Image: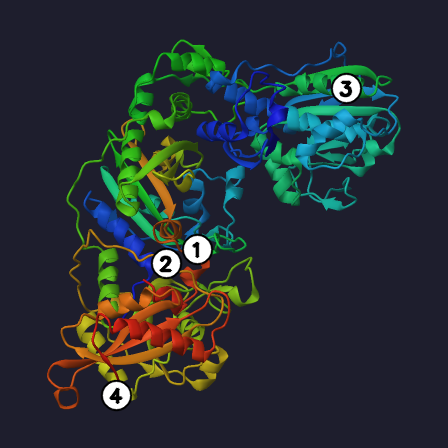
């Protein structure tokens, strides 16, 4: 009988394999997280409207289902010293209505690089290298300013195939905010770093053409059996 | 924010860009824009950039960063009367740090008036129906300048007003006729004598001071507050208004004067008989912090030199350069540290101008937990199992959600059984199947489990699978048959289902992960909303035939969604030395409708008929 690896696993594997060649460590973290690690230490404070950008499932006061895999980075930095290169894949949750491009449960892959001479140029180079690995060499990029409270400057990466008109928004990234470096116990005068986060389902849609994000958690063999 | 290109011309008279180019340019300076219709844009403004939530703010930012759009012209205004203290406005010491500015004008002889056509037209991008001239004008001023305005009935509060913090247990009836109970420490306005709450500041006014009371004397307030107090007002009461949305994101404390002067102009034009009797201003603008302008830090962060012209552009953006530091303009609540200056420099030079730099290779390792789990998954797939992924939410569990979306998704799963059984239920046409899932469960502690469900095998084959999984995958699973009542509850159609689960930390094998750098991920074919017809077809072919030749041939037909090898049978006795029997499972579908059995048969016959051109075979 033919077995199939879930396409989300395949995409994660393809990305992790690429980054293993750059010395990245793959780190896991908890799906139930404190507000402190999911939000506050990442500068998404309760008294700022940025908190409303992510609809959150609350478990009990102070505890949430993580809304991104960025929490893992903070936890990873409690036991690591720079230079650091990590990626953190994981299941994340948003309390929002579902449709073909939104789901309450999806997968994110985050990255963190910290060192003494890490620049936005490194971030852009890394993102472009990864995208070429995933989609092919025949693509071009557009980099726009982006807003995520835990990075500054922040950016959004768009790409398109060379014969295409339309830009596709693919991920958000930025230089780790000095306050977040401080929350990681690092001296922001000495160290700089970059971070990005992307939806694995989004990457799958781009490289494979999956037209409805809900297929991923449907258990439908007509989906699973295709990969 | 919805923006009409034509409305931007008031501030950028030389703008020649078409809507699409304008959207592209705005996106590249951080205001992601999408063309809705020709001439109409939807602009997504960062939650940190309240200053851009208006025609004036958006065009000011654009003109400073991209001079090619032409000169920026501020909106025409009327002369306001000399400021006087015509109204008794006091601010309780506890509230003082939250109030940045409070400007007031007094109108008299106002009678409810319908807006003239010119005003009505300006309302169009806001998606608002014209109501009354005052209401319409306050909305327009907010859209133009970003300044929320509040209209009080002057007679109701002529005795004066105190800005204060609420006490727990206080309440008031808001403009929407709802009684609102207040927590302590919200920013409110009180009647000077009765002490009644007349306004939940920056959020919603009280019915007791509503301008709809029509005394003819109206007090128009333009104010600025510390953003987090208005957020508290809004969150605590669950009320979000256009005003609270903007105040939370920051309203420029220098804006109220301009907004009232603009309001006065539009009002006088529309209603020449109106009298603007008095103007009063209060300002308590916090001292702007100086931020180090450290070019080395900025270029180290960006990986790009800071061009000297960038400093001029900072000046255009309203920053004051003071030696080796800068003072951000009053409207930029988001600029607090040197990294924020780096962001501005990035917007000035354009992020696309930064040279991509490779990170440099470094040897990695495949020893960690992630690679072990991946090794386990690959070993299971090798044994013919398919990985499923299902939701973490179930009906009952130890860890429950405060705000579940549905009743059967109230808790976090305590095992993976539910997911595996729903996966089988989802695929009633798979008579023989084996699924596994690896995921986190909450008992209530969080840990990673593996669950395996198998159907379509005899008990002896199940025991055989147990020992194979132990040997090849390090899984000491004991499969137990799932009770028929449980299968019925999950609507599982397969008759005999076996299930086993254990924590991943009990896996007894270390996997050596071999990376495949060239792995490809299959293209997805759209799944019909109509059910498939699933058939197993066995053919006898020469042992030299590669089964993938057959599956590729089948998949070339649009109606075949999945074609895969499910069994391989060799028998010298029955088939001879040279031959092998291959069983393929085919999923036949139609995107438009439910296929009839005979239609599927016809498609399959056709596929195998053409197969015989390349692969000699016999149907078994």
Badge 4 is on which residue?
B460
Q: Are marks 2 and 1 in contact (CB under 8 Å)?
A: yes
- Quick one: which residue is furthest to the bottom in this view? B573
The location of residue B353, given as percent across then percent down, is 34, 25
For this orientation, the residue located farthest to the front is: B613
The residue drawn where x is 68% and y is 17% is: B257
Q: Please tell me whether mark 1 or mark 3 is closer to you in this view.
A: 1
Report the residue marked by disc 2.
Answer: B524
**Residue wearing tag 3:** B105
The answer to whether marks 1 and 3 mark residues whose Cβ atoms lie closer than 8 Å is no
Which residue is rendered at x = 69% and y = 43% of the image? B182
* Residues packed near mark 2 inside 10 Å, few (<14), some (14 to 19) or many (20 plus): some
In the rendered image, the quadrant that contains the N terminus of chain B is top right
In space, the residues marked 4 and 3 are separated at their CA atoms by 89 Å
Judge left or right: residue B469 versus residue A41: left
Q: Is residue A56 visible?
A: yes
Residue B474 placement: quadrant:
bottom left
> In x, y percent, where is residue B20?
51, 31
At numbered mark 4, what does the secondary structure look like: helix, strand or loop?
Answer: helix
Q: What secondary structure is found at the residue carrying circle 1?
A: loop
For disc 2, the chain is: B
């Amino acid at each position: 009988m033919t077995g199939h690896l879930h396409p989300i696993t395949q995409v994660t594997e393809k990305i992790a394999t690429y980054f293993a060649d750059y010395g990245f460590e793959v780190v896991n973290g908890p799906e139930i997280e404190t507000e402190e690690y999911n939000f506050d230490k990442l500068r998404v404070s309760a008294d700022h409207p940025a908190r409303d950008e992510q609809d959150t499932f609350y478990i009990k006061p102070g505890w949430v289902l993580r809304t991104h895999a960025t929490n893992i980075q903070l936890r990873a930095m409690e036991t690591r010293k720079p230079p650091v290169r990590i990626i953190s894949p994981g299941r994340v949750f948003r309390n929002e209505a579902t449709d073909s491009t939104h789901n309450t449960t999806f997968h994110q892959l985050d990255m963190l690089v910290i060192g003494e001479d890490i620049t936005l140029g490194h971030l852009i180079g890394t993102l472009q290298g990864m995208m070429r690995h995933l989609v092919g060499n025949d693509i071009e990029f557009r980099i726009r300013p982006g807003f995520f409270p835990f990075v500054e400057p922040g950016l959004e990466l768009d790409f398109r195939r060379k014969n295409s008109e339309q830009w596709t928004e693919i991920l958000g990234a930025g230089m780790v905010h000095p306050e977040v470096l401080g929350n990681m116990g690092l001296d922001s005068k000495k160290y700089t770093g970059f971070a990005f986060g992307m939806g694995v389902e989004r990457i799958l849609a781009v490289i494979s053409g999956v037209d409805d994000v809900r297929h991923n958690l449907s258990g439908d063999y007509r989906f699973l059996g295709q990969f | 924010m919805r923006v009409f290109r034509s409305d931007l011309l008031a501030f950028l008279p030389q703008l020649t860009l078409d809507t699409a180019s304008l959207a592209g340019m705005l996106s590249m300076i951080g205001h992601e824009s999408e063309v809705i219709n020709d001439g109409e844009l939807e602009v997504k403004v960062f939650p940190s950039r309240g200053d851009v939530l208006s025609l004036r703010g958006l065009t000011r930012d654009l003109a400073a960063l991209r001079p090619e759009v032409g000169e920026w012209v501020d909106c025409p205004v009327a002369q306001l009367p000399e400021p006087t203290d015509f109204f008794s406005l006091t601010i309780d010491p506890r509230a003082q740090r939250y109030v940045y500015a409070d400007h007031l004008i007094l109108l008299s002889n106002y009678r409810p008036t319908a807006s003239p056509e010119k005003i009505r037209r300006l309302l169009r991008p806001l998606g608002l129906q014209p109501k009354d001239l005052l209401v319409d004008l306050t909305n327009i001023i907010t859209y133009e300048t970003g300044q929320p305005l509040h209209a009080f009935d002057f007679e109701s509060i002529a005795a004066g007003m105190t800005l204060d913090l609420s006490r727990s247990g206080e309440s008031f009836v808001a403009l929407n006729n709802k009684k609102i109970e207040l927590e302590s420490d919200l920013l409110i306005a009180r009647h000077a004598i009765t002490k009644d709450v007349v306004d939940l500041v920056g959020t919603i006014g009280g019915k007791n001071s509503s301008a709809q009371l029509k005394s003819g004397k109206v007090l128009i307030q333009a104010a600025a507050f510390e953003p987090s107090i208005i957020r508290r007002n809004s969150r605590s009461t669950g009320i979000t208004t256009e005003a609270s949305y903007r105040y939370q994101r920051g309203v420029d404390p220098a804006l109220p004067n301009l907004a009232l002067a603009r309001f006065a102009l539009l009002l006088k034009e529309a209603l020449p008989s109106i009298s603007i009797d008095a103007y009063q201003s209060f300002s308590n603008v916090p001292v702007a912090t100086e931020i180090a302008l450290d070019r080395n830090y900025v270029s180290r962060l960006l990986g790009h030199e800071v061009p000297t012209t960038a400093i001029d552009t900072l000046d255009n953006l309203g920053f004051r350069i003071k030696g080796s530091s800068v003072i951000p303009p009053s409207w930029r609540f988001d600029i607090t540290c040197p990294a924020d200056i780096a962001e501005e420099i990035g917007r000035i030079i354009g992020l696309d101008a930064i040279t991509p730099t490779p990170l440099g290779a470094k040897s990695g390792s495949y020893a960690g937990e992630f690679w072990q789990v991946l090794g386990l998954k690959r070993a299971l797939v090798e044994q013919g199992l398919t990985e499923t992924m299902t939701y973490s939410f179930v009906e009952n569990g130890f860890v429950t959600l405060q705000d579940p979306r549905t009743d059967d998704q109230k808790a976090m799963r305590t095992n993976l059984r539910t997911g595996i059984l729903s996966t089988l239920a989802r695929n009633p046409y798979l008579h023989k199947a084996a699924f596994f899932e690896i995921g986190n469960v909450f008992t209530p502690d969080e840990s990673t489990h593996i669950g395996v469900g198998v159907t379509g095998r005899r008990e002896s084959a199940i025991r055989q699978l147990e020992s194979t999984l132990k040997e090849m995958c390090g899984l000491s699973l004991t499969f137990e048959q799932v009770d028929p009542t449980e299968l019925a509850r999950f609507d599982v159609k397969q008759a005999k289902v076996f299930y086993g689960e254990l924590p991943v930390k009990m896996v007894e094998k270390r996997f050596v992960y071999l990376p495949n750098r060239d792995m490809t991920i299959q293209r997805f074919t759209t799944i019909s909303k109509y059910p498939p017809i699933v058939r197993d077809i066995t053919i006898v072919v020469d042992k030299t035939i590669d089964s993938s030749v057959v599956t590729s041939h089948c998949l070339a037909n649009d109606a075949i969604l999945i074609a895969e090898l499910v069994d391989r049978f060799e028998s010298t006795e029955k088939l001879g030395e040279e031959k092998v029997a291959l069983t393929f499972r085919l999923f036949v579908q139609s995107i438009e409708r439910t296929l009839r059995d005979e239609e599927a048969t016809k498609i399959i016959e056709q596929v195998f008929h053409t197969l015989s051109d390349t692969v000699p075979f016999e149907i078994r």
